[in-house]
Image: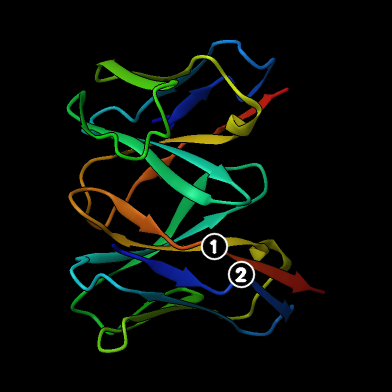
Amino acid sequence: DAGVIQSPRHEVTEMGQEVTLRCKPISGHDYLFWYRQTMMRGLELLIYFNNNVPIDDSGMPEDRFSAKMPNASFSTLKIQPSEPRDSAVYFCASSPGLGRFGQYFGPGTRLTVT
Amino acid sequence: GEDVEQSLFLSVREGDSSVINCTYTDSSSTYLYWYKQEPGAGLQLLTYIFSNMDMKQDQRLTVLLNKKDKHLSLRIADTQTGDSAIYFCAGGGRGEKLIFGQGTELSVKP
């Protein structure tokens, strides 16, 4: 398996623009997680899905953020409108269920909002 | 709520042992994990320990778990420059969530 795939790897956009980040989880994994990593706040869980259904979105910072998982092999995280404080690295991770396998992380999308 | 604490930096000489420490508040985690993050990359699972174990050894890695003190440590024997990275400990939160520490940046000097 190719692992968790994220696109784009880098995104630079202007404040106010819509940004869409994409993730393809590992086939057969029932759980998908979106994280944000910054120097100031470390690694934050934004939302996670189980069998395509959002389970916990308590980490989503505000209404400008939304996430969808239309099928088992694809998820998006959208920011509209984007702001400079959204600049961070966004990771997608998938898991077959917590146990000795933990979560498998993608390479991340580095987002810069100017 | 659940919390996981780590020291932020550790510097060692090549060939020495490194010990990275972690404390946690939630004792209900079934598994505890150590992840490694190299520059520009995602987190990679290094090893894990089941909560009813005290120690686990995996080649150069040794994980120690003190459940009474809620303390977890990762020892890397014969540390190499390629081990330079950020190391995160993580425990299970509610449901399938993982709670990560802030990460310890390990610097290995030749």
> Would you name the residue on which mark 1 appears?
B103
Say which amino acid is labelled 2.
Answer: Leu
Residue in the foreground of this view, choosing between B10 and B16: B10
> Would you name the residue on which mark 2 appears?
B8
Q: Residues within 10 Å of mark 2 (few under 14, many from 20)?
A: some
Task: State which tag comes first along the sequence, 1 or 2.
Answer: 2
Are the residues under badges 1 and 2 in a single subunit? yes
The answer to whether mark 1 and mark 2 are in CB contact below 8 A is yes
Q: Find the residue positioned furthest to the right.
A: B110
Could you tell whether B4 is left or right of A83 in the image? left
Could you tell whether A51 is left or right of B99 in the image? left
The alpha-carbon separation of the residues under discs 1 and 2 comes to 6 Å
The correct choice, above or below, for A40 with respect to A14 in the image is below
Total marks shown come to 2
Q: Is residue B101 visible?
A: yes
Say which amino acid is labelled 1.
Answer: Gly
| Secondary structure found at label 1 | loop
The correct choice, above or below, for B86 with respect to A62 in the image is below
Which label was assigned to residue B20? none
Could you tell whether B74 is left or right of A94 in the image? right
Q: Position of residue B5 (x, y in %)?
A: 45, 71
Q: Chain of mark 1?
A: B
**Residue at (29% x, 18% y) in the render:** A69
The correct choice, above or below, for A29 with respect to B81 in the image is above
Q: Quadrant of the N terminus of chain A?
A: top left
| Secondary structure found at label 2 | loop
**Residue at (66% x, 42% y) in the render:** B40
Give the quarter of the image for residue B12: bottom right
